[in-house]
Amino acid sequence: MPNEALARKIYSLQNKIVRELNNAHIFLEQAQPLLVEAKAKYENSKSKADRRYYVPSVERRKFAKRTDAELKDIYAHYTSNGLFEAFLINSVSQFESFLGDVIIEFLKHYPMRITETVQGMPACPNISPKDLVAAADKDELMQRVFSDHVGNVFRQRPSLYMTYLSKLLSVKNDPSFSDYYEVCATRDLVVHNNGIANALYVEKAGTKARGAIGEKIPVDQDYYYEALAKLKKVSGAIKRDIEKKYGKDEEV
């Protein structure tokens, strides 16, 4: 049954996440030449003196000392990998928020579908009598239940929560989802294992794994830009299938 209001909202959410991902790319394309130029200044420096640089401190203003050679190494790290690792973490987080917003928006239109089950996915939380009494109104209570449920959904691994999302919204298991699983697995390595592949990475990434256990999995400019394209493709696949079922392309 068509639901053009839902289709329009998902269309808007998808446009928003694509814009955010594109913003990251535009910023890095603008920032990289400036950082490379700054690095060159330190590469060409003959000075061996320590210079003071302000660093944050809870108790009082503090400074750290670095030579120009050390500054060159700092710039080299961030322009080759560090900056892209940080942006990958942020972009995947933004994308998961987009997926969560899609699920919540769907549940607003079809609240009874919150009982939808997928093996391995926690069931929706029960509403206690205390919650019923404390809620200012029904809509507030429902929003809290949806938020708690989505929080539980995204504590699971991507392959599971995408299976749930696909079943809930009648979205096809698009080939781009496999790429997404590898991107998420790489994000987890950066956060938890210094970018070194482990058994969990290989399991999560599946056939898309970019290295064997014990190998360093690179996150450089090329990989990050490819990851952005893959995230956008996943969002487009979700929007496409929702438009097919709930709306008309020319009206959303």
Image (cartoon, helix red, strand yellow):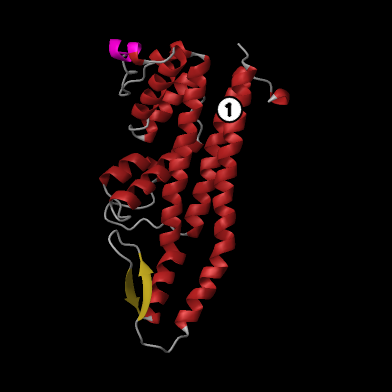
Q: Secondary structure at mark 1?
A: helix
Q: Indicate the quadrant containing the C terminus: top left, top right, bottom left or bottom right.
A: top right
Residue 36: x and y, percent?
A: 52, 71
Q: Quadrant of the N terminus?
A: top right
Q: Is residue 145 visible?
A: yes
Query: Pointer 1: what residue?
Result: 10
> Viewed as shown, does residue 105 lie left or right of 213?
right
**What residue is rendered at 30% in x and 56% in y?**
194
Residue at left offset 56%, top offset 44%: 20
Image position, residue 100 (x, y; %) = 45, 30
Residue closer to the observer: 106 or 143: 143
Magenta region, residue range: 127-133
Residue 141, compared with residue 85, is above or below; it is above
- Mark 1 belongs to which amino acid? Ile
Q: Point out the residue furthest to the right here.
A: 250
Residue located 31% across and 22% down the image: 122
